[in-house]
Image (cartoon, rainbow, N blue to C red):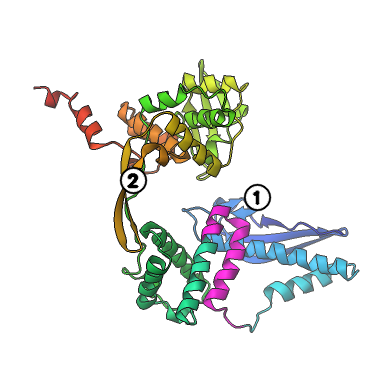
């Protein structure tokens, strides 16, 4: 069974203005080229993956890619049907089928809000990260359960401030979600509404009002100072190989500032040498930024331990579990006050520091320790990938006592 692979190519890839995106098909010795109906500037096109560049700079390209995915899916569906019906397709038959499935105007009704969200999640599953799609699915599940509990028909016209207050109340009291989790679901819901509005389905703009907001509260996150990292490094874990691998990966993260998704992808090819110094040169997964990081001797020691490779990674979830065990073995028992609003009530609990350690602690530890050591902020940001100092300073975790202690070294406090 032959199913051709549609190829998406710009009509004028070297132009300096928006140009048509064409679809190329080859089958049975024939070649078909047809316009997708979309135009794009060549600077916004990735010819390697044959899709529009979808980023914060070009957020509008999400719709373009969804349409290209639809063309890809529908075209393959057409050829599967030909195979099932033992039809040998020719140029005219293929073009007629493509036109009927993709380009003829339809008199079908506008989908309801919940129908649209379900379809949007299906489309997103092809082009967005699994974690993002899982969040979409959870928000959708809560929306449906909310509508069922209230015995209401949820549609575009019902999305106003009354809906917002009622939905937040449901998430807060019926589901007992935390304030930040509720805020995340509101943000996702606004994503759904923005997409529906851009496609012409929704005309009601209340969801863009100032009071229809994402709520949030500060989250206490920890970092480990260099003394604590050293204690973890010196733990004898030879009889606990899984913990030893996790510990070694954690140390790499603490001295590179990389996210979990990046430090588990380090290969010997990422290690480069220049002027007798060794560096990690890697393209980050989340932001597609190239970062070059000087390697501390301790990181080189770990790589040598595993013959130039990193320890075999575990899942993020399993690694987070093991890190808490490692922290407890290291005696990181300091009680940290954690304040959280849940079900509309604020409470503060004292939690042992080891119970708050996770893979993201590496990154916060790197940023904070580098900052405390006096490295220039912009140099640290070149490694962490933060675009602004405001973003960066959210990562720096210095207690009031640590801040006061560092100030005592300044000349102002010595006279």
| Image quadrant in which the C terminus is located | top left
Q: Position of residue 209 (x, y in %)?
A: 34, 71
Q: Is residue 369 magenta?
A: no
- Of 182 and 274, the residue lying toward us: 182
* Chain part drawn in magenta: 109-135
Query: Nearer the observer, disc 2 or disc 1?
Result: 2
User: Residue 220, which numbered label?
Assistant: 2
Up the image or down, 411 lies above or below 160; here it is above
Percent x, y for residue 117? 55, 70
Q: Quadrant of residue 28?
A: bottom right
Q: Is residue 326 above or below residue 214?
A: above
Question: Gap in Å between the C-alphas at discs 2 and 1?
Answer: 40 Å
Residue 1 % position (x, y): 87, 59
Q: Secondary structure at mark 2?
A: loop
Q: Is residue 123 magenta-colored?
A: yes
The first of marks 2 and 1 along the sequence is 1
Which mark is on residue 49? Answer: 1
């Amino acid at each position: 069974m032959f199913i051709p692979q549609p190829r998406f190519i710009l009509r004028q890839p070297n132009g300096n203005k928006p140009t048509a995106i064409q679809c190329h098909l080859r089958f049975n010795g024939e070649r078909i080229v047809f316009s997708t109906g979309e135009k794009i500037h060549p600077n916004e096109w990735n010819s390697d993956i044959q899709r529009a560049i979808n980023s914060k700079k070009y957020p509008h390209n999400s719709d373009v890619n969804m349409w290209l995915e639809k063309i890809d899916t529908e075209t393959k569906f057409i050829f599967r049907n030909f195979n099932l019906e033992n039809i040998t397709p020719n140029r005219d038959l293929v073009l007629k089928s493509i036109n009927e499935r993709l380009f003829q105007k339809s008199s079908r009704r506008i989908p309801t809000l919940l129908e649209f969200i379900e379809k949007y999640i299906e489309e997103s599953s092809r082009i967005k990260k699994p974690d993002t799609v899982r969040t979409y699915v959870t928000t959708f599940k809560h929306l449906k359960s909310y509508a069922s509990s209230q015995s209401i028909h949820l549609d575009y016209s019902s999305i106003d401030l009354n809906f917002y207050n009622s939905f937040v109340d449901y998430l807060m009291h019926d589901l007992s979600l935390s304030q930040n989790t509720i805020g995340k679901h509101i943000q996702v819901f606004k994503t759904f509404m923005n997409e529906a509005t851009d496609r012409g389905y929704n005309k009601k703009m209340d969801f863009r009002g100032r009071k229809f907001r994402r709520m949030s509260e500060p989250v206490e996150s920890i970092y480990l100072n260099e003394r604590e990292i050293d204690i973890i490094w010196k733990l004898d874990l030879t009889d606990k190989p899984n913990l030893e691998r996790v510990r070694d990966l954690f140390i790499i993260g603490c001295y590179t500032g990389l996210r979990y998704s990046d430090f588990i992808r380090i290969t010997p090819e990422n290690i480069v040498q220049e002027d007798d110094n060794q560096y990690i040169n890697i393209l980050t997964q989340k932001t597609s930024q190239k970062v070059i990081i000087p390697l501390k001797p301790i990181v080189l020691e770990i790589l040598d331990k595993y013959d130039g490779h990193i320890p075999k990674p575990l899942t993020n979830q399993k690694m987070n579990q093991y890190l808490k065990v490692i922290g407890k073995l290291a005696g990181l028992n300091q009680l940290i006050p954690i304040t959280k609003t849940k079900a509309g009530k604020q409470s503060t609990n004292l939690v042992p520091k080891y119970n708050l350690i996770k893979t993201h602690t590496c990154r916060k530890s790197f940023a904070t320790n580098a900052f405390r050591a006096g490295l220039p902020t912009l140099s640290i940001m070149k490694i962490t990938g933060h675009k602004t100092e405001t973003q960066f300073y959210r990562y720096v975790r210095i207690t009031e006592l640590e801040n006061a202690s560092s100030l005592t070294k300044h000349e102002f406090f010595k006279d």
